[in-house]
Amino acid sequence: MLFYGGVRARMPCVVDLDHVLGMEDFEVYVDDGRYSVPSLYLITAASEARALAIAAEMLTASIHHRGVELRRGGERIYALGSFAAPGPAARDGSDSAAV
């Protein structure tokens, strides 16, 4: 996997090790009490279970972290803490809090 200017680029002549090793990309949104918008973290994990474990670790990494949401390709997989409650995800009036 190559990165150019912060953007992931796939080159046809380069072996995609993530695919060969069975790795998957996930997005983790962290509800941090110090900020008005969630922080976005991009992670790569061998399985959905491992990605969830990483997200759970991120939730307990700081007393300021109120919740985490795990997504793959933009699709919500799990929500922990404040993201599991209907409030934070529905701030704009949408019903996106439902899993």
Image: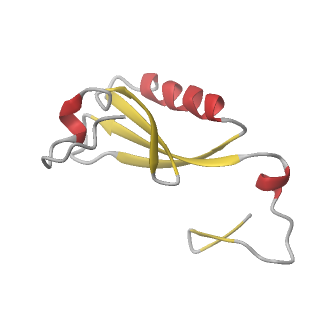
Q: Is residue 16 above or below residue 48?
A: below
| Occupied quadrant, residue 38 | top left
State left or right for residue 22 relative to residue 27.
Answer: right
Tell me where residue 62 appears, x and y as whole percent: 40, 26
| Occupied quadrant, residue 14 | bottom right
Q: Is residue 86 above or below residue 43?
A: above
State left or right for residue 44 relative to residue 69.
Answer: right
Tell me where residue 25 appears, x and y as whole percent: 62, 50
Residue at the spot x=67%, y=47% of the render? 24
Residue at the spot x=57%, y=74% of the render? 5
State left or right for residue 13 relative to residue 96.
Answer: right
Tell me where residue 41 appears, x and y as whole percent: 49, 47
Q: Quadrant where the N terminus lies?
A: bottom right
Q: Residue furthest bottom?
A: 12
Q: How is the image coloured?
A: secondary structure
Q: Is residue 62 above or below residue 70?
A: above
Residue at the spot x=65%, y=30% of the render? 50
- Name the one closer to the observer, 78 or 9: 78
Residue at the spot x=22%, y=42% of the render? 95
Q: Is residue 26 above or below residue 78?
A: below
Q: How many labels sit on residues?
A: 0
State left or right for residue 8 relative to residue 92.
Answer: right
Q: Quadrant where the C terminus lies?
A: top left
Tell me where residue 29 appears, x and y as whole percent: 40, 43
